[in-house]
Image (spheres, grey):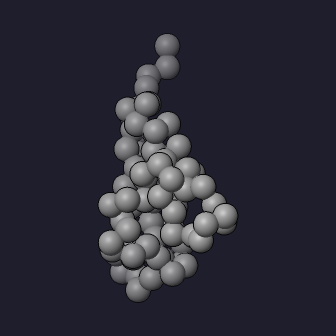
């Protein structure tokens, strides 16, 4: 799955921290900084991966999140 937006994007210096618990670029009182940390934990728990690119290739702004999950066979 890939999610792409055309917002302001993520600063290069913040990219390595966006999945850290309680990291937020919002002002105090405007968010907890837990959303992406929880998403990351759930995906990792299921042996998946989440990749982020900002800006996405070919775009001047925005961000792209790719979620890759292992395939399972039905039985």
Query: Residue 51: percent from the left, percent from the top?
Result: 37, 55
Give above or below for 15 relative to 39.
Answer: below
State which quadrant residue 40 falls in: top left
- Residue at 43 percent across and 26 percent down: it is 72
Query: Residue 9: percent from the left, percent from the top?
Result: 47, 76
Give above or below for 60 relative to 53.
Answer: below
Q: Specify the farthest residue to the bottom.
A: 60
- Residue at 36 percent across and 80 percent down: it is 58
Query: Foreground residue, 65 or 22?
Result: 22
Q: Specify the farthest residue to the right.
A: 29
Is 23 left or right of 31, judged from the image as shown? Answer: left
State which quadrant residue 26 falls in: bottom right
Task: Answer whether residue 10 is visible to the viewer in this image.
Answer: yes
Query: Foreground residue, 20 or 39?
Result: 20
Query: Residue 18: percent from the left, percent from the top?
Result: 43, 59
Task: Answer whether residue 36 is visible to the viewer in this image.
Answer: no
Is 32 left or right of 1, judged from the image as shown? Answer: right
Is 21 left or right of 54, judged from the image as shown? Answer: right
Query: Residue 52: percent from the left, percent from the top?
Result: 39, 61
Give above or below for 11 relative to 30.
Answer: below
Q: Count the marks: how many? A: 0
Q: Specify the farthest residue to the front.
A: 28
- Residue at 63 percent across and 60 percent down: it is 31
């Amino acid at each position: 799955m890939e999610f792409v937006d055309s917002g302001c994007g993520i600063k290069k210096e913040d990219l390595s921290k966006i999945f850290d618990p309680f990291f937020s670029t919002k002002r105090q009182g405007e968010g907890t900084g837990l959303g992406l940390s929880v998403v990351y934990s759930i995906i990792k728990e299921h042996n998946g991966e989440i990749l982020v690119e900002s800006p996405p290739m070919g775009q001047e702004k925005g961000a792209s999140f790719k979620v890759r999950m292992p395939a399972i066979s039905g039985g």
